[in-house]
Amino acid sequence: SAVISQKPSRDICQRGTSLTIQCQVDSQVTMMFWYRQQPGQSLTLIATANQGSEATYESGFVIDKFPISRPNLTFSTLTVSNMSPEDSSIYLCSVRTGEGSPLHFGNGTRLTVT
Amino acid sequence: GQNIDQPTEMTATEGAIVQINCTYQTSGFNGLFWYQQHAGEAPTFLSYNVLDGLEEKGRFSSFLSRSKGYSYLLLKELQMKDSASYLCAVADSNYQLIWGAGTKLIIKP
């Protein structure tokens, strides 16, 4: 399976600031996704990162708050903008090599907003 | 709507066997996945079922019945390191993954 490097692994940020999370994959993948996992909860899909075009956002998530870049098939970034304490969560980059294949995750970014 | 149900928490004893159930109602079905997630870590893939029956992988097995909308993950010879959350996820007709809330498994010595 692909090796996924995500950074930073954790950060503590102040309210109103922004944080950009990077995701690097060691091979080209067509499908790349960003998830959020709030404490004690399951995974929530934020968006699908599309190479060379705008990301596809799920209900409840908007581009102004969570801008995503995907310049090529091995790299993506997620920015959490104008943060509030409610954004404190684990953010996970994930990839799939095909529709019937499993999802593999990066190690996640644990974000705390104070 | 789409729904996946699994127990919130289970407790088992080291060396024993435990079965974690997952029932689902989704718009279409293109496979069911089980993931393990240790506290503070990312989920890791355990198994994939798309046809009815049992898939065995060492101490872990996963079963699927599509007609019943039901799956289970069976863990044998439990070890303390198996203490984790176990997530069930179903790929719907668009291959989008629908996630269960996870089952926290506590292993006691």
Image (cartoon, rainbow, N blue to C red):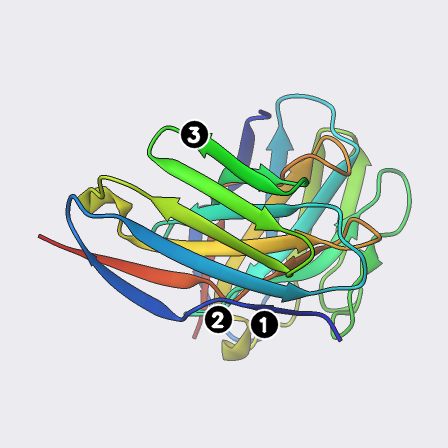
Gap in angstroms between the C-alphas marked 1 and 3: 43 Å
The label nearer to you, 2 versus 3, is 3
Q: Secondary structure at mark 2?
A: loop
Q: Position of residue A87 (x, y in %)?
A: 55, 72
Q: Secondary structure at mark 1?
A: loop
Rendered residue at 58%/46% (across/down): B33
Rendered residue at 70%/48% (across/down): A33
The 10 Å Cα crowd at callout 2, few under 14, some 14 to 19, many 20 or more, is some
Give the residue number, with chain letter if any, for mark 2.
A14
Amino acid beneath label 3: Lys
Rendered residue at 44%/49% (across/down): B73
Compare residues A4 and B91 and report the one nearer the observer: B91
The label nearer to you, 1 versus 3, is 3
Rendered residue at 64%/60% (across/down): B69
Amino acid beneath label 1: Met
Mark 3 chain: B
Compare residues A8 and B97 and report the one nearer the observer: B97
What numbered label is drawn on residue A83? 1
The label nearer to you, 1 versus 2, is 1
Horizontally, residue B102 falls left or right of residue B16, namely: right
Give the residue number, with chain letter if any, for mark 3.
B57
Q: Is residue A11 visible?
A: no
Q: Position of residue B97 (x, y in %)?
A: 69, 54
Mark 1 chain: A
Q: Secondary structure at mark 3?
A: strand
Using the rendered image, report if marks 1 and 2 lie on a common chain. yes
The 10 Å Cα crowd at callout 1, few under 14, some 14 to 19, many 20 or more, is many
Would you place residue A105 above or below residue A18 in this image? above
Amino acid beneath label 2: Gln
